[in-house]
Image (cartoon, rainbow, N blue to C red):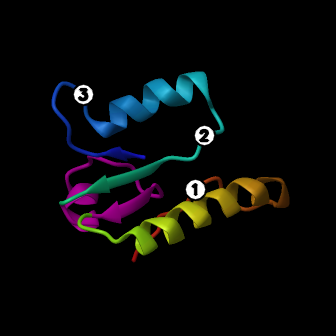
Amino acid sequence: MTDVVMPEMNGRDLAGQIRALYPDIRLLFMSGYTANVIAHQGILDDGVAFIQKPFSTADMTVKVRKLLDMASDKNQGYPKQKFLRP
């Protein structure tokens, strides 16, 4: 789980470095910007898991659970990740 906008390195670049080491890792991006703004500016690719700040512990738990379930379903032909909206 990483923020999209950070000093020194953005979340997309961080995710690329992590994926180089762990290609099957699930990533959840967060931001105070809306998903539409982020997608429109090309900060994140379409189809990534995203949660908008502020979020509750319950909302985060649901998002993480969906990502973990998708990981276990990957052998059943489901996409690796899809865009998760609130």
Numbered badge on residue 7? none
In x, y percent, where is residue 85?
A: 41, 73
Distance of mark 3 from mark 1, alpha carbons? 23 Å
As measured in the structure, the alpha-carbon distance from the residue carrying label 2 to the one carrying label 1 is 10 Å
x, y percent for residue 82: 54, 62
Q: Residues within 10 Å of mark 3 (few under 14, many from 20)?
A: few
User: In the rendered view, would you say 43 is above or below 40?
Assistant: above
Residue mark closest to the camera, 3 vs 1: 3
- Residues at circles 3 and 1 in contact by the CB criterion of under 8 Å: no
Disc 2 to disc 3, how far (Cα)? Answer: 19 Å
Marking on residue 9: 3
Q: Which stretch did the figure color magenta?
A: 33-52
- Which kind of residue does numbered mark 1 sit on? Gln
Residue farthest toward the front in the current orientation of the protein? 57
Residue 34 on the magenta span? yes
> In this image, 35 relative to 73: left or right?
left
Q: Report the mark closest to the observer, 2 or 1.
A: 2
The earlier-in-sequence mark between 3 and 1 is 3
Q: Quadrant of residue 65?
A: bottom right
Which sits in the foreground, 61 or 47?
61
Name the disc covering residue 25, or none: 2
Judged from this view, the residue extending furthest toward the bottom is: 86
Residue 26 x %, y %: 57, 47
| Residue that appears at 64% across and 53% down | 80
Q: Does label 2 or label 3 sit earlier along the sequence? A: 3
Q: Tell me the amino acid under the disc marked 3.
A: Met
Image label count: 3
- Badge 1 local density, few (<14 within 10 Å), some, or many (20+)? some
Q: Residues within 10 Å of mark 2 (few under 14, many from 20)?
A: some
Image check: 58 left or right of 32? right
15 and 68: which is toward the camera: 68
Per the image, the residue denoted by label 1 is 81
